[in-house]
Image (cartoon, rainbow, N blue to C red):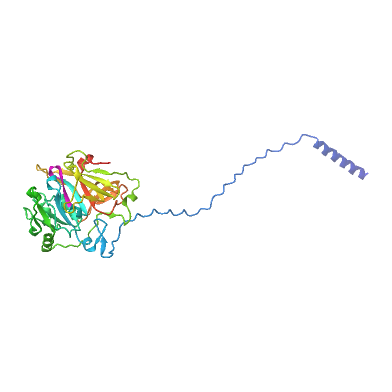
Amino acid sequence: MKRKLWMGLVASMTVTMLLAGCGKKEEQPEQIVEEVVVPTPQPIPTEAPTPTPEPEFAVIKERETVNGQIQSYLTGEWIDEAKATRRPIAVMIPNNSPAMPQHGLSKAAIIYEAPVEGRITRLMAVIEDFDDLERVGPVRSSRDYFIYQAMGYQAIYCNWGLARPYVEELINRDTVQNISAAVEGIYKPAHEAFGRYSRPGYAKEFTGYLFIDGMFEAAERLGYEWEYDDAFVPPYTFAADEVLAQENYPDAPAATMIYPGGKEGNQGGYGAYNPYFEYHEDDNLYYRYQDGDKQIDEFDGSQLAVSNVVFQYCHGEVRDDHDYLAFGVHGEGDAIVFTGGKVIKGTWKRYDGDATPAKFYDENDEEIIFNQGKTWVCNIWQEYGEHVLYE
């Protein structure tokens, strides 16, 4: 009886389960699948490579004596050590037609040219190699802006002419070692250094010369020292041997003709005799022309030629009714350096006093590199600077 009851219970449970299985299927909740973003592998950080520095352009730095020669502070060229370590002389020389040809200009390491009254220019020849010269000249009077430039080279300043009214106080200072002819306003004249030289057909004012033997006698009598002092600052940075400065300025524009006063006459003190320079690529020199012809040195018959031409723009003023001029040669101003056929624009700066020269910098404020050789510095009257021309 019990067995029947158990079997019935099992059957009843089975029927119930089957009936449940035949009913509506229960809905399952929707599954949300999240998108898995796999990060991109990142490189392992490493130190940035050190950039390769630009090769330094080769320039003259420390001077060394080799076989009795050393490189000049003024030209960078090799000359006898006795000459390169000796202070130069700075000689005032007229540049108008009635004075030419001049004698000894080709020996100058630096020629400084600036306007004077009458809208003509005068030259100052800075010479360190003068032992084989008998005379230099003709010699004319000073202007104060020439004296200030000579002081920057620690040169012994030589002139012949009236010192008043604008030069007297300056030229007689203890800081200006001058050899001057016996004229009004000169307190310590050097009569032994000057004399007349016969030039038939020339006015007397163009027959006075500085004689080198007498100049040495005057310097000794006046107690002048011939060695540069410790404060001396070389005026230029020169390219090293076998290197051309223009290689450091590949993007600079080129020019072969240079006109400091333009092509037309009497502009800003440079036009009266229409001076200009012509660049010759074969020897890397700028040749000087004036009055429509080559400017020749009487000393050796050579045409004046230099390795570098500089335009130094200076503020200028007319001082009086006699047309005496004044130029600011301290502080700073615009500048253009012509070297190796290239035109390098920049500035000049002179803030460290009379005993230091103007230094020249490019538009990146880096000191401009000059080619070895002579340099001609043109004082450009800033207010007439628009007449400057080069092509």
Residue that lies at the very extreme toward the left in this rendered image: 184
Residue 359, image x and y in percent?
A: 25, 52
Residue 175, image x and y in percent?
A: 15, 58
For residue 36, above or below residue 131? above
Q: Quadrant of the C terminus?
A: top left
For residue 31, above or below residue 75? above
Secondary structure mostly seen in the magenta stretch: strand
Residue 67, image x and y in percent?
A: 27, 65
Q: Is residue 17 visible?
A: yes
Read off the magenta span.
116-124
Q: Nearer the viewer, residue 355 or 301?
A: 301
Residue that lies at the very extreme toward the top in this rendered image: 24
Q: At 25% across and 48% down in the image, what residue appears?
A: 286
Q: Nearer the viewer, residue 223 or 128?
A: 128
Q: Quadrant of the N terminus?
A: top right
Q: At 92% across and 45% down in the image, what residue appears?
A: 3
Residue 255 highlighted magenta (yes or no): no
184 sits to left or right of 242? left
Residue 123 highlighted magenta (yes or no): yes
